[in-house]
Amino acid sequence: MSINTLSGFDVERSVLDDWESLIYLICWFATIGICREKADRRSLEELEDLEVRQWRRGSAKEVSKVKVKHLSELKDFGYYILDYFHSDNDIETLQDLTEDLYKALFQNPYLRKDTRCDGSRYKGTIPVRIRGEEKKSDPFKERLTKKSEIAAALLETMTQAWKDSMSTIRNQRKPSP
């Protein structure tokens, strides 16, 4: 479930919440392991100490706070979640896809409005104080104003990942000379 939905923020639920939920599904399954053989997957006991497990514990507010922490910045997302994806073959492809979806949703260039060096108004899920503005900006309200553009960027990311995976599959099927 998205942070917005879990938190009960006064922000309209949108397609962006669904995209965010997709990121969580990918993370969960990639951490367990998307293996053909069930025996190769991580057990629930093995998952016990991993941060991703906290996404299923506690109240909605508690889970929301954990997700805000894990997704506060790309480096935190990598440290808490992506680095613990199951060490299955081709897991880097899923890590790259998840990272790209994260960037499109939480660090989208359509939200660049200030004069920071990198031009990015948000670094993830944390409201940021912007000089000259009384109130901290809410990243969830802000991204809602650009939901069409962000959703299009997310779809483009998924489409490119699909094309790349199809190309990889085709190359694997080619007979060796």
Image: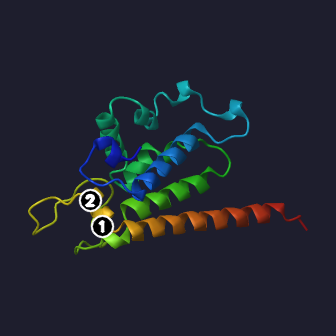
Badge 1: how crowded within 10 Å, few (<14), some, or many (20+)?
A: few
Disc 2 target residue:
141
Disc 1 target residue:
145
Q: Secondary structure at mark 1?
A: loop
Quadrant in which the N terminus is drawn: top left
User: What coloring was used for the rendering?
Assistant: rainbow
Relative to 107, residue 79 above or below: above
Give the Cα separation between the discs numbered 2 and 1. Answer: 7 Å
- In the rendered structure, the answer to whether residue 96 lies left or right of residue 13 reads right
Relative to 42, residue 6 above or below: below
Residue occupying the point 88% across, 64% down: 176
Residue occupying the point 46% across, 34% down: 50
Q: Are marks 2 and 1 in contact (CB under 8 Å)?
A: yes
Mark 2: amino acid: Lys
Quadrant in which the C terminus is drawn: bottom right
Q: Nearer the viewer, residue 136 or 46?
A: 136
Residue 2 in the image, given as x and y percentages of width and height: 39, 47
Residue 35 in the image, given as x and y percentages of width and height: 69, 40
Q: Secondary structure at mark 2?
A: helix
Badge 2: how crowded within 10 Å, few (<14), some, or many (20+)?
A: some
Residue occupying the point 66% across, 67% down: 163
Residue occupying the point 73% across, 35% down: 37
- In the rendered structure, the answer to whether residue 10 lies left or right of residue 78 reads left
Mark 1: amino acid: Thr
- In the rendered structure, the answer to whether residue 17 lies left or right of residue 95 reads left
Most distant residue in the right direction: 177
Most distant residue in the top direction: 45
Residue 13 in the image, given as x and y percentages of width and height: 35, 53
Residue 134 in the image, given as x and y percentages of width and height: 8, 62
Q: Nearer the viewer, residue 19 or 133?
A: 19
Relative to 36, residue 14 above or below: below
